[in-house]
Image: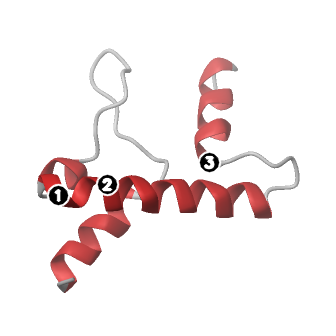
């Protein structure tokens, strides 16, 4: 795997997503830059990252769960 592809895969793994003018989450620009055949590897990296986040969180939440909870609570 080349370095550019590795960087794209890594950058898709975080839970943070930009939002549009209406507050809807936008796909990661890195996801859109990935070749189609690398998107499954990106999904796998995202799943591993969520597992690691849950493992170290005292409540067992992933970054995604925390982001959704903050959004629901208006923070």
Which mark is drawn over residue 17? none
- Extreme-right residue of the structure: 58
Q: How far from the left and from the top, in percent, is residue 63?
A: 62, 48
Which residue lies at the image location 65% right of the left edge and 37% below the top edge? 65
Horizontally, residue 64 falls left or right of residue 46, namely right
Task: Choose top left, top right, bottom left or bottom right for residue 56.
Answer: bottom right
Mark 3 or 1, nearer chain start? 1
Instruction: Check disc 1 and report the residue beneath it.
Output: 37
Disc 3 versus disc 2: nearer the observer: 2
Helix, strand or loop status at disc 2: helix
Instruction: Check disc 3 and report the residue beneath it.
Output: 63
Give how far apart the Cα atoms at labels 1 and 2 are.
7 Å
Disc 1, disc 2: CB below 8 Å?
yes
Crowding near pointer 3: few (<14 within 10 Å), some, many (20+)? Answer: some
Q: How far from the left and from the top, in percent, is residue 71?
A: 59, 25
Q: How far from the left and from the top, in percent, is residue 2?
A: 17, 84
Decide: is 72 above or below 69.
above
- Extreme-top residue of the structure: 22
Horizontally, residue 18 falls left or right of residue 63, namely left
Horizontally, residue 39 falls left or right of residue 74, namely left
Instruction: Check disc 2 and report the residue beneath it.
Output: 40
């Amino acid at each position: 795997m080349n370095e550019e592809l590795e960087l794209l895969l890594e950058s898709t793994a975080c839970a943070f997503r930009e939002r549009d003018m209406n507050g809807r989450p936008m796909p990661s620009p890195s996801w859109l830059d990935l070749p189609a055949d690398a998107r499954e590897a990106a999904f796998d990296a995202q799943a591993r990252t969520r597992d690691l986040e849950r493992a170290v969180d005292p409540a067992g939440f992933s970054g995604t769960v925390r982001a959704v909870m903050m959004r629901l609570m208006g923070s």
